[in-house]
Amino acid sequence: MKRKVYHSDPEIMHGAVVFVGTRVPVSSLFDHLEDDFSLEEFLDNFPTVKREQCLAVLEESKHHAEEAALAPIA
């Protein structure tokens, strides 16, 4: 069973989806990448987030995008 790398809790960052064990929103990873920051720069800026967590989020996003691309259009 895969370990969860992100979660949402109303008591943490007003329920934003954050990396487990941190208060860092997952959206901040995507924001940094969109702004041309490297993964290394993101990790330097947010030392509580582990590389493995980022890679798992990116892999899951890739999987969802691939599924969406294959879904029939209604």
Image: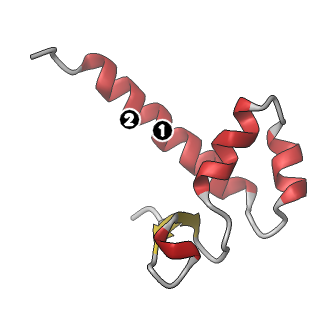
Seen at 57% across and 65% down, the residue is 18
Mark 2 lies on a secondary structure that is helix
Crowding at dot 2, Cα within 10 Å, few <14 / some 14-19 / many 20+, comes out as few
Of all residues, the one furthest to the top in this rendering is 73
Instruction: Say what amino acid the circle numbered 2 marks.
Output: His
Q: Position of residue 2 (x, y in %)?
A: 44, 62
Could you say which is closer to the camera, residue 17 or residue 38? Answer: 17
Quarter holding the C terminus is: top left
Judging by the rendered image, the residue that carries numbered circle 1 is: 61
**Which color scheme is applied?**
secondary structure
- Mark 1–mark 2 CB contact (< 8 Å): yes
Q: Is residue 52 above or below residue 62?
A: below
- The residue labelled by disc 2 is 64
Amino acid on which disc 1 is placed: Ser
In the rendering, which numbered label is found on residue 46?
A: none
Horizontally, is 31 left or right of 57 in the view? right
The image quadrant that residue 70 belongs to is top left
Q: Residue furthest left?
A: 74
Residue displayed at 87% across by 45% down: 40
Image position, residue 69 (x, y; %): 32, 18
Q: Secondary structure at mark 1?
A: helix
Q: Position of residue 29 (x, y in %)?
A: 68, 47
